[in-house]
Image (spheres, grey):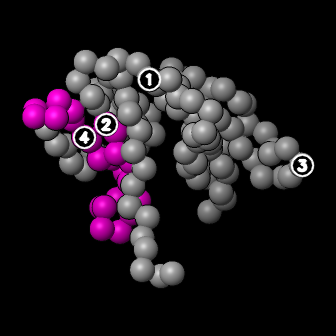
Amino acid sequence: MSNFSYLHTMLRVGDLERSVAFYTGLLGMTELRRTEVPAGKYTLVFIGYGDERAHTVLELTYNWGVQHYELGSAFGHLALGVPDIAATVAQLRAAGAKISREPGPVQFGTTMIAFIEDPDGYKIELIERKP
């Protein structure tokens, strides 16, 4: 069906400013919009690599007063393409990112990947995609 378009993925976060700093500072995303909802006691921040009309983005949801979530076993990871995985991981490590899998080939394949974690423990797969 071609009537669908993928708009965003939502993650609940325990410290909104810490998470915004991680995704914008370390991963180079841009804060696109922020909505405070006092009646619902939550804040939404949409971030990404381009305008929402043309790009899938990430929605960070902060429920006021909730500082921790159990991640569960159903969610896997987000994935980002990078041109040089070794250099990217070195830069992220120097900036304080948690590296949970060092760069190397995917099991049973040749694609080079690595994993990092955001401040709430969500896994982010980095996939080398040469220009």
Identify the element where label 4 is drawn. Answer: strand
Residue 64 against residue 108 in the figure, above or below: above
Say which amino acid is labelled 3: Phe
- Please identify the quarter of the rendering in which residue 78 is found: top right
Label 1 or label 4, whichever comes before in sequence order: 4
Label 4 or label 3, whichever comes before in sequence order: 4
Identify the element where label 2 is drawn. Answer: strand
Question: In the rendering, at what x and y percent does residue 98 appear?
Answer: 57, 23
Q: Is residue 59 magenta?
A: yes
Label 1 or label 3, whichever comes before in sequence order: 1
Contact check, label 4 and label 2, Cβ < 8 Å: yes
Density class for disc 1 (Cα within 10 Å; few <14, some 14-19, many ≥20) is few
Q: CA distance from mark 2 to mark 3?
A: 36 Å
Residue 114 against residue 16 in the figure, above or below: below
Label 2 or label 1, whichever comes before in sequence order: 2
Identify the element where label 3 is drawn. Answer: loop
Residue 44 got which mark? Answer: 4
Residue 108 got which mark? Answer: 3
Which quadrant of the figure contains the C terminus?
bottom right
Say which amino acid is labelled 2: Thr
Q: CA distance from mark 1 to mark 3?
A: 33 Å
Density class for disc 3 (Cα within 10 Å; few <14, some 14-19, many ≥20) is few
Does residue 49 appear in this view? no
- Please identify the quarter of the rendering in which residue 31 is found: top left
Q: Which residue is mark 1?
A: 69
Say which amino acid is labelled 4: Leu
